[in-house]
Image: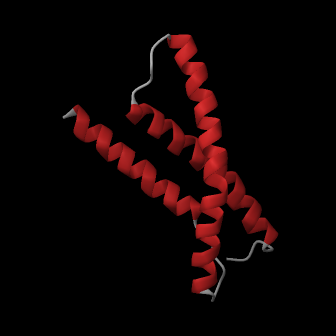
Amino acid sequence: MQTIREHLSLAVLAVVYLLVSIRYFPGRAMHSLVETLIHMLSVAPISLGATLVIAAVLQRLVKERLPVSRTVRLFLVTAICLEFILGLAHYFEMGGTA
């Protein structure tokens, strides 16, 4: 039962990450898709680096290696926080139009 919950919460985090990564340009679907892919490929290394630093600090504190599922979850949470901030910047850069 616990593993099903863990897998489900990991899937929900992945879907939320994909949703906050979308860069929307009204009336230009292909431009939105291309910009979203470029954005994800350019921001993912930053999130990965932050995750590696946080995981290293946590491993030093706990003196154990973190499980892979926890590290992936940490990456997704870090990426969601970063994407949310960058998404707000993108929104306000466009003039706040929806």
Is 29 displayed left or right of 85 in the figure? left
Count of residue discs? 0
Q: Quadrant of the C terminus?
A: bottom right
Residue beneath the point at 59% across and 42% down = 48
Residue beneath the point at 47% across and 34% down = 71
Residue beneath the point at 38% across and 35% down = 69
Residue beneath the point at 55% across and 20% down = 58
| Residue 23 in view, yes or no | no
The picture quadrant where one finds residue 89 is bottom right
| Residue 35 in view, yes or no | yes
Tell me if residue 32 comes above or below residue 36 in the rendering: below
Q: Quadrant of the N terminus?
A: top left
Residue 66: where, in percent of width, then height? 44, 24
Specify how the rendered protein is coloured: secondary structure
Q: Tell which residue pokes out farthest to the bottom in this image.
A: 27
Residue 45: where, in percent of width, then height? 63, 48
Residue 27: where, in percent of width, then height? 63, 89
Tell me if residue 68 comes above or below residue 36 in the rendering: above
Tell me if residue 54 comes above or below residue 12 in the rendering: above
Q: Tell which residue pokes out farthest to the left in this image.
A: 1
Tell me if residue 4 comes above or below residue 12 in the rendering: above
Task: Return the residue nearer the eye: 36 or 15.
Answer: 36
The picture quadrant where one finds residue 78 is top right
The picture quadrant where one finds residue 68 is top left
Is 25 displayed left or right of 59 in the figure? right
